[in-house]
């Protein structure tokens, strides 16, 4: 069973494994990019022991490294930082059509000598890699840096939550606040009660610092046809910008954007 596009959360992983795979099919949680030209980090079905929400280990010949924000390589296990690739591989991108300098600036300038993926990653005590989402999705709340994927994973642990997307927005006291868009079953309870339950779930799993400042129950999320959540749209809405979204015709359901704007907190 394959999974691509967004880092899969633990609840979705277990549902996929138990209900679709009937507990007998290995989940191949792949990490790769269009720019990499192929899968880079992934379990090999039937060979690599899997772990919920982890892309596990690099494929043969792929040499990922984790760098801190100053470009220092973080050795060993139980570390977290910027996912980079240390050595070339056959299918890597070589340029961007019509704009070679943009290619260099985007992928090779921030950490000279490395390919910078733009993703945050954690390498656990077993050396397994867990993709945390785009590094520009990291939220700084009162000096505490946290990945949106971590908060989303906690929100999704609530039994009434179907899916969530978290973004940061300007907060006059904290610097950044946490704005959560949540698809949930509200049957038999008010949205206010459900929102408080979600905050309590997040506080229990991560801590009070990660409780969303704003929770908006939404009918859907803006996704591309490949399943990627268009967080730039959600960030703009959270910041009070209700236009200038660019081309949204590629969304699976463009109308969901207007519905989210109508229900903005």
Image: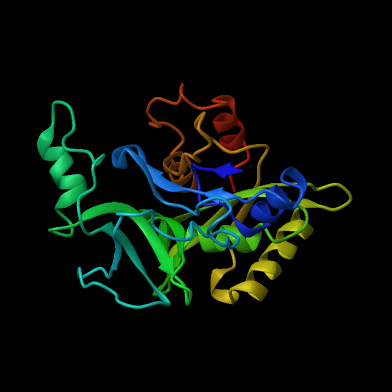
Q: Is residue 18 left or right of residue 107?
A: right
Image-quadrant location for residue 10 = bottom right
Name the residue nearer the viewer: 178 or 239.
178
Kindly give the residue lying farthest to the top in the view shown: 249
Give the residue displayed 53% in from the left and 63% down from the top: 150
Quadrant in the picture for the N terminus: top right
Q: Which colour scheme is used?
A: rainbow
Above or below: residue 232 compared with residue 58: above
Name the residue nearer the viewer: 232 or 154.
154
- Image label count: 0
Give the residue displayed 73% in from the left and 43% down from the top: 20
Q: Position of residue 156 (x, y in %)?
A: 66, 57
Q: Position of residue 168 (x, y in %)?
A: 45, 56
Image-quadrant location for residue 133 = bottom left
| Residue 187, visible in the rendered structure | yes
Above or below: residue 170 compared with residue 244: below
Kindly give the residue lying farthest to the right in the view shown: 188
Kindly give the residue lying farthest to the left in the view shown: 101
| Residue 175, visible in the rendered structure | no
Give the residue displayed 21% in from the left and 48% down from the top: 107
Image-quadrant location for residue 80 = bottom left
Q: Position of residue 260 (x, y in %)?
A: 59, 37
Name the residue nearer the viewer: 31 or 43.
43
Give the residue displayed 31% in from the left and 38% down from the top: 37
Q: Position of residue 160 (x, y in %)?
A: 77, 53
Q: Is residue 215 left or right of residue 48?
A: right
């Amino acid at each position: 069973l394959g999974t691509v596009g967004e880092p899969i959360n633990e609840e979705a992983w277990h549902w996929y494994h138990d209900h679709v795979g009937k507990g007998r099919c290995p989940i191949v949680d792949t990490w790769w990019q269009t720019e990499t030209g192929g899968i880079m980090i992934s379990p090999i079905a039937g060979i690599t022991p899997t772990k919920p929400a982890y892309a596990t280990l690099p494929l043969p010949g792929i040499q990922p490294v984790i760098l801190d924000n100053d470009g220092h390589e973080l050795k060993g296990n139980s570390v977290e930082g910027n996912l980079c690739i240390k050595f070339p591989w056959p299918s890597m991108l070589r340029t961007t059509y019509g704009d070679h300098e943009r290619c260099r600036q985007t992928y090779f300038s921030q950490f000279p000598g490395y390919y910078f993926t733009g993703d945050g990653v954690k390498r656990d005590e077993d050396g397994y890699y867990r993709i945390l989402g785009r590094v520009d999705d990291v939220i700084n709340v009162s000096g505490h840096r946290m990945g949106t994927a971590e908060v989303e994973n906690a929100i999704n642990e609530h039994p009434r939550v179907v899916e969530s997307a978290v973004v940061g927005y300007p907060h006059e006291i904290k610097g950044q606040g946490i704005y959560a868009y949540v698809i949930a079953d509200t049957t038999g309870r008010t949205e206010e009660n459900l929102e408080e339950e979600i905050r309590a779930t997040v506080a229990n799993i991560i801590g009070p610092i990660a409780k969303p400042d704003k929770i908006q129950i939404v009918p859907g999320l803006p996704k591309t046809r490949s399943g990627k959540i268009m967080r730039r749209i959600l960030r703009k809405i959270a910041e009070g910008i209700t236009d200038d979204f660019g081309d949204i015709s590629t969304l699976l359901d463009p109308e969901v954007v207007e519905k989210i704007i109508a229900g903005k907190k």
